[in-house]
Amino acid sequence: MHICRSIEDCRAAVADLRNRGKSIGFVPTMGALHDGHLSLVRLAQTNATSCVASIFVNPTQFGNASDLDLYPRDEDRDLSLLDEAGVEIVFLPEADVIYPPGDETIVETTRLANMLHGKVRPGHFRGVTSVVNRLFNIVQPDVAVFGEKDYQQLMVIRQMVRDLHMPVRIVGGPTMREADGLAMSSRNQRLSPADRLAAVVLSRSLDAAAARAGDPGVSVDDIRDVIANTIATEPRARLRGLDTVAADTLDYLHGPINEPLAIMISVQFSDILLIDQRVIQP
Ligand code: PAF
């Protein structure tokens, strides 16, 4: 596995793969890898003949410095996991490689970035698109893979690729879960033991909503009640966001469920915010 820290080195390594007739599947990450990331690597490998991953804790998508400082980092472990998974190239830039002095260009999907989670975390999706655009320009992949757990992020990236005519195909990877149903996330390792046990309430609320959605005449408000009531049964959990939107446009839905409904929730445990989502078919 080739590890590169400069843009020149990364471009040369990717060119070498291309010269050997390989197509490039790309998995951008912020490190602290878990099985969810490795499932994205497998998906990239089924959609392309080689896999490039990046590890970069992107400062522009963090609202506050302490969240950025506390973000878990374990480069050696991450690199050995990617090596075992058969990744050919890992790009590990420092912040001033991605954002050199004088850097001033931002990329923003103006509607999608500023609704839903984007209202709770102003500037977050602008940071994501600004970095993913730079990473795409450096790696120039044929296919790039992103987790469906960050549903709004996936939609934002699809929109950017469409609007900017980027020659890359975006593939969404299903959410990987722990045995009790908690969606895998690098943030889970920062939960206290009691909060970790309590965090199962996110997937439990989505399961309850999916079950309720099968009832005749059920409305979007009924689904919202099921989520809110289930989260309320867990005293350690604080519901921070509950969005019930059209799965393809993220516009709010009301009344009977006549089209695919995306339920996006964010729930706080102490100072950790966890997210999860489910798409329910009508
Ligand atoms: O999903 C993530 O880990 C990050 O938002 C991404 C896509 C790597 C951009 O920094």
Image: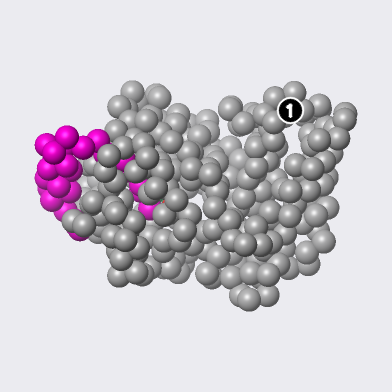
Residue found at the very far bottom of the displayed protein: 193
Quarter occupied by residue 18: top left
Residues drawn in magenta: 3-29
Quarter occupied by residue 238: bottom right
For the C terminus, the quadrant is top right
User: Residue 103 at what x, y percent from top left?
Assistant: 25, 45
Image point (30%, 70%), residue name: 76
Left or right relative to 99: residue 249: right
Image point (54%, 40%), residue name: 152
Q: Nearer the viewer, residue 163 or 49?
A: 49
Left or right relative to 227: residue 18: left
Instruction: State the residue position of label 1.
Output: 282
Say if 4 sits above or below 118 in the image. Answer: below
Instruction: Tell me how the rendering is colored.
Output: one colour
Is the distance from the Cβ of mark 1 to the nearest ligand 1 atom less than 8 Å? Answer: no
Residue 65 visible from this viewpoint? no
User: Residue 69 at what x, y percent from top left?
Assistant: 41, 68
Residue 219 visible from this viewpoint? yes
Say if 63 sits above or below 113 in the image. Answer: below
Quarter occupied by residue 142: top left
